[in-house]
Image (cartoon, rainbow, N blue to C red):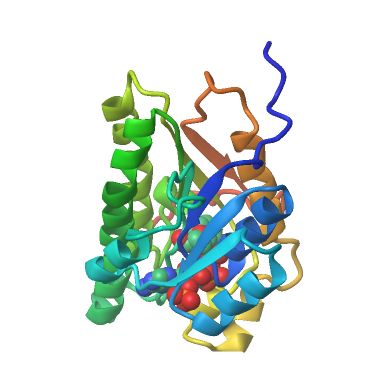
Amino acid sequence: MTPPTATWAEGRVAFITGATSGFGKAFAERIVKAGGRVIATGRREDRLKALADAAPEGRCLTRVMDIRDPASILASLADLPEAFAPIDILFNNAGLALGLGKAHEADLADWDTMIATNVTGLAHVTRAVLPGMVARNRGHLINMSSVAASYPYPGGNIYGATKAFVRQFSLNLRCDLLGTAVKVTSIEPGMAETEFSEVRFKQDGAAAAKVYADMQPMTADDIVDVVESVLRLPAHINVNTLEVMPVAQAFGPFAVARGG
Ligand code: NDP
Ligand code: 8X3
């Protein structure tokens, strides 16, 4: 077997969506530390600035970008300096869950936001970055899906469906990219403690803390370890989907309504 790439990050450029928090921030820090360059994007400019300030000179470019705004995506990719233009890694990570209520009681605006971010936004970024990868015959799309793509749970309604889109989109991209060297991986984590639950519960810190109470969730760095292991593989191996959970999380039984 070919040995793993020692310099998995050196000389590589990663375009990261959602670099201001959680997995995206941790991945930006990891790749910069390992000798790569990042184009870090997100809406919170102060967080992007902090990321760039902490990175070695010339290794972190930032772009304020709302993934729901196609013009903002195109502006982020326009006129990239030469050192950042050949994007090797697209970390398609920006996304969110909003609410955990029943479908028939859910806020439709929350559904629209999840679809616009997790589905439409991710598709638009992919469409904008992919032609360059194909032209260079080099690249890796890391698409952030979730265990929610495969396993239904109460209140997961639209969120899980958007993550099922990410998984299936990733697999379909593999078909279209056959014959090129461009790789696609759908990463499908379970519970990881980031700002994810604070966002889901709309800044209700107590509700967010309850999700991870008295159990050991994964961390953003754990997920980045998994992503790094995928990126270290030799050029001829593609990990299609990769599901990962904390040991303290598993599956429930089928639910049955009785007495009806
Ligand atoms: P965080 O809330 O910590 O980070 C989410 C990131 O997405 C932030 O950087 C945020 O940036 C960005 N984002 C959200 N909306 C937009 C937008 N409209 N435009 C641009 N950026 C946006 O969560 P995680 O790091 O946990 O989540 C990252 C991804 O992983 C998500 O897709 C999530 O669904 C998925 N995931 C998370 C799991 C978990 O348990 N944590 C498990 C499985 C999957 P900003 O607000 O600055 O724009
Ligand atoms: C986030 C993981 O289990 O909260 O995608 O849906 S979960």
In the rendered view, tell whether residue 202 sits above or below residue 73.
below
In this rendering, is residue 55 above or below 82?
A: below
Instruction: Between residue 152 and residue 259, name the one nearer to us.
Output: 152
Residue 136 image point, x, y percent: 38, 32
Q: Residue at x 56, y 84 (%)?
A: 46
Residue at the image point whose x is 25% and y is 80% from the top: 109
Tell how many labels: 0
Residue 183 left/right relative to 50 = left
Quarter occupied by the N terminus: top right
Viewer-proximal residue among 22 and 41: 41
Foreground residue among 140 and 160: 140
Nearest the viewer among 101 and 129 is: 129
Q: Residue, x 56% and y 49% (percent of image)?
A: 251
Quick check: can you spot residue 171? no
Left or right side of 29 for 20: left
Outermost residue to the top: 1
Q: Position of residue 19 (x, y in %)?
A: 54, 66
Asked if residue 122 is positioned above or below residue 215 in the image, the reply reads above
Residue at the image position 53 percent from the left and 87 percent from the top: 203
Q: Using the image, determine if residue 256 lies above or below residue 9.
A: below
Q: Position of residue 54 (x, y in %)?
A: 71, 71
Pinpoint residue 134: horizontal percent, then vertical percent. 33, 32
Give the quarter of the image for residue 259. bottom left
Q: Is residue 135 visible?
A: yes
Tell me if 201 is positioned left or right of 178 in this view: right
Which image quarter holds the C terminus? Answer: bottom left
